[in-house]
Image (tube, rainbow, N blue to C red):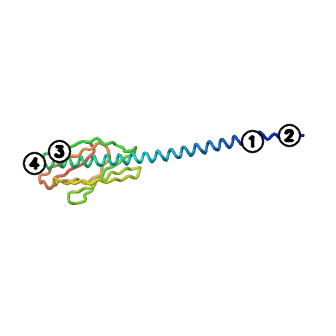
Amino acid sequence: MIRRDERALSSALSYALIVVLTVSLTAGLVLGTSSMIGEQREQVARDQVDAVGERLASTIMTVDRMNATEPRPASAAVIREFPRRLGGVQYRIKTVEMGSNRWRLYVETRDIAINQSFTVRLRSGAALEETTINGGPLRVYYDRAPDPDDDRVRLENA
């Protein structure tokens, strides 16, 4: 009588189950980690957008205060070093007039859907030029016109 050896089947089955279990756990770990990294990256970009927007609004208001002095300065400029990327993604800055010496700054990232806005109020009577520029080092300057009503605060890449 020939005996069947069932141990080989049991070993092969155990091996297959261990491989399936290991692959499943590894895949779960990789997917969970990539999701967590994506969320962290987005939070870092969001925090950096806030910091850039607040610093830029402060810089614009500083140039405006320089303009408000007597006598009006012939020129005033501030160059600020802002990062070229926030959380690893490019961003741009847009200025839009809201009326009555108030402007809105929009800091928008390109790859991650982050769009934060900041309000800027200019007290000198100068206008903030509406523009859209890429992030990075910026020059904020006062452009004096012959007529004080035509004075402008401008933004450009430095």
- Labels 1 & 4 near each other (Cβ < 8 A): no
Nearer the N terminus, badge 4 or badge 2?
2
Who's the residue at 22% across and 60% down the image? Answer: 99
Mark 1, secondary structure of its residue? helix
Label 4 crowd bin: few (<14), some (14–19), many (20+), radius 10 Å: few
Nearer the N terminus, badge 3 or badge 1?
1
Residue identifier under label 4: 70
Numbered mark located on residue 10 in the image: 1
Label 1 vs label 4: CA separation?
93 Å
Mark 2, secondary structure of its residue? loop
Seen as rendered, the residue at the extreme left is 71
Nearer the N terminus, badge 3 or badge 4?
4
Label 3 vs label 2: CA separation?
98 Å
**28 left or right of 108?**
right
Compare residues 17 and 126 and report the one nearer the observer: 17
Residue identifier under label 2: 3
Who's the residue at 51% across and 44% down the image? Answer: 33
**Where in the figure is residue 101, as x and y percent of width and height?**
20, 57
Residue type, label 2 = Arg
**Where in the figure is residue 108, as x and y percent of width and height?**
35, 51
Residue type, label 1 = Ser
Residue identifier under label 3: 76
